């Protein structure tokens, strides 16, 4: 096995360096993209924690509701646990592992660990109190007024939940998707855990379905405008049912998918809007299993791709002069990574069956999608007008002042005294100095529409990393790391 891996490894290097002439080390980027998740950990850290500037935090999370909700991830540069984006991140990490696990080499262990850190927490949220799904810890309005290390947190760790009288089909649908997807990841390596994940996914999904409503209405300013469910909850019901169908093959979920009437066709894919992801996921049945019942989703997946490709007559997607897909001004790279995931994955499905299609008069092959995906990945890793890698700690030139509390403040080891809520603004937040702690692997919001990037700590639209940017990037990195 070991020997096989090494010959595979060298074969890969030969191809990438000599034939394609590409200088990027996708294996290194993949390893770093997973390491990032260690920097976002909440709860009690294990002894083998590699980002050692982080320590235990949020150890009393859940106490205000008399439950244990320790663990999980801080979503981005703050100290709040928002389950809606966390669950999406988990679904994307799981999907990355399912599609590209064989190309990950030893990193598959790290991918599973990154998933499990989230699912351990999500399981607690789903099972701690019957009739409730906990959906977040930490008052975001209070937290966002502070600039303090997670290890020092002294802000209200308010606990939020949805229940039959305060429903949240969006957050519950996504949580069900995450648990179902992860159940497939662990099916062989930990069957007992996998069964718990699947059983819980089914229960959470039933709750989402039976008590329909948006968590934005139920929880208001606790989740909006931070992670408001702008696209409604039909997409999460479709996505949750699609994942449960993939995990179980039970016809009940297929019938649900058919009957949901969720047929929006947006031109992006994100923690909020899952239609395109669901369509690609379902099209797998059409392409790989030749199942005619799923041809409709294949069509929808292809319509989506035609809205993304630069020369397609139905394209509604802009590109910067430097070649980066440009969707929205705030944290644009989240859209780039999640759409790139769909491009590599659909390209992979097409290759299996030698399938091609047309966007108007534009002829699309698997290589069309692969090339665009590669261009996006390479741009992020440094092939751009600034020669800037938007992944922290990768390449010679990367963001030095990311909008991230833990990274920008001295660690407990160098500064044992508490910094407190206001203590981080001066001299740390407002300083021009580079962050003292390197959040290795973090992909930030990215450049602006002119390929510019000021690298300023207060510029959260461009300088903040987020779990869902990385969660979707792991798949494409593994895809190119294992290319052969
Ligand atoms: C993009 O960022 C650069 C560098 O900070 C800045 O000079 C430029 O004005 C910005 N462009 C846009 C369109 O925001």
Image (cartoon, helix red, strand yellow):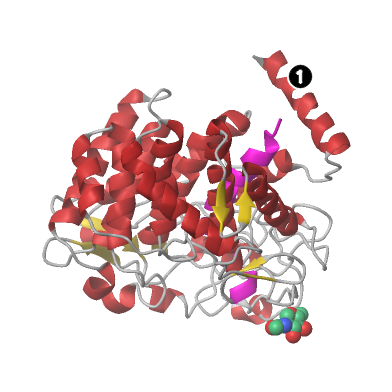
How far from the left and from the top, in percent, is residue 66? Answer: 21, 56
Span colored in magenta: 460-484
Instruction: State the residue in front, 266 or 205.
Output: 266
Residue 386, above or below 129? below
Residue 359, located in which quarter of the rendered image?
Answer: bottom right
**SS for callout 1:** helix
Does residue 39 appear to the left or right of 29 in the view shown?
Answer: left
How far from the left and from the top, in percent, is residue 417? Answer: 58, 66
Callout 1: few (<14), some (14-19), or many (20+) C-alpha neighbours within 10 Å? Answer: few
Does residue 386 appear to the left or right of 420 in the view shown?
Answer: right
Q: Which residue is mark 1?
A: 7
Please indicate, yes or no, whether residue 198 appears anywhere in the rendered image.
Answer: yes
**The magenta stretch spans residue 476:** yes
- Which corner quadrant of the figure contains ligand 1? bottom right
Residue 433, above or below 236? below
| Label total for image | 1
Residue 1, located in which quarter of the rendered image?
Answer: top right
């Amino acid at each position: 096995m070991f020997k096989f891996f090494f010959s595979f490894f060298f074969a890969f290097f030969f191809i990438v360096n000599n034939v394609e002439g590409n200088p990027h080390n996708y294996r290194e980027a993949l390893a770093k993209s997973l390491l990032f998740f260690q920097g976002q950990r909440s709860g009690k850290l294990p002894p083998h924690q590699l980002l050692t500037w982080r320590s235990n935090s949020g150890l009393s999370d859940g106490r205000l509701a008399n439950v244990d909700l320790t663990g999980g991830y801080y979503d981005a540069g703050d100290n709040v646990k928002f389950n809606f984006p966390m669950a999406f991140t988990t679904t994307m990490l799981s999907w990355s592992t399912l599609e590209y696990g064989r190309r990950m080499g030893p990193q598959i262990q790290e991918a599973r660990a990154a998933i499990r850190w989230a699912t351990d927490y999500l399981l607690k949220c789903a099972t701690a109190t019957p009739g409730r799904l906990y959906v977040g810890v930490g008052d975001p309005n209070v937290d966002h007024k502070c600039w303090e290390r997670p290890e020092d947190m002294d802000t209200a760790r308010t606990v939020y939940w949805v229940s039959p009288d305060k429903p949240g089909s969006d957050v519950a649908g996504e949580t069900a998707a995450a648990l179902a997807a992860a159940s497939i990841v662990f099916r062989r390596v930990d069957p007992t855990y996998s069964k718990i994940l699947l059983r819980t996914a089914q229960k959470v999904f039933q709750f989402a379905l039976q008590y329909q409503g948006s968590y934005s209405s139920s929880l208001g300013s606790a989740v909006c405008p931070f992670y408001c469910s702008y696209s409604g909850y039909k997409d999460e019901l479709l996505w949750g049912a699609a994942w449960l169908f993939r995990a179980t093959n039970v016809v009940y979920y297929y019938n649900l998918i058919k009957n949901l009437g969720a047929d929006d066709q947006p031109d992006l894919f994100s923690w909020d809007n899952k239609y395109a992801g669901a369509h690609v996921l379902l099209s797998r049945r059409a392409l790989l299993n030749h199942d005619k019942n799923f041809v409709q989703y294949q069509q929808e997946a292809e319509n989506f791709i035609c809205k993304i490709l630069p020369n397609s007559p139905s394209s509604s997607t802009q590109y910067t002069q430097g070649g980066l897909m440009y969707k929205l001004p705030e944290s644009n790279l989240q859209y780039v990574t999640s759409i790139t995931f769909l491009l590599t994955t659909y390209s992979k499905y097409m290759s299996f069956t030698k399938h091609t299609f047309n966007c108007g008069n534009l002829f699309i092959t698997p290589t069309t999608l692969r090339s665009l995906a590669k261009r996006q990945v390479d741009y992020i890793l440094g092939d751009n007008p600034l020669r800037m890698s938007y992944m922290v700690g990768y390449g010679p030139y990367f963001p030095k002042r990311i909008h991230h509390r833990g990274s920008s403040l001295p660690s407990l080891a160098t500064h044992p005294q508490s910094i407190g809520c206001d203590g981080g603004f001066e001299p740390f937040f407002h300083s021009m100095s580079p962050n003292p702690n390197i959040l290795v692997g973090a992909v930030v919001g990215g450049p602006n529409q002119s390929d510019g990037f000021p690298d300023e700590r207060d510029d959260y639209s461009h300088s903040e990393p987020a779990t869902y940017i990385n969660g979707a990037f792991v798949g494409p990195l593994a895809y190119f790391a294992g290319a052969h």
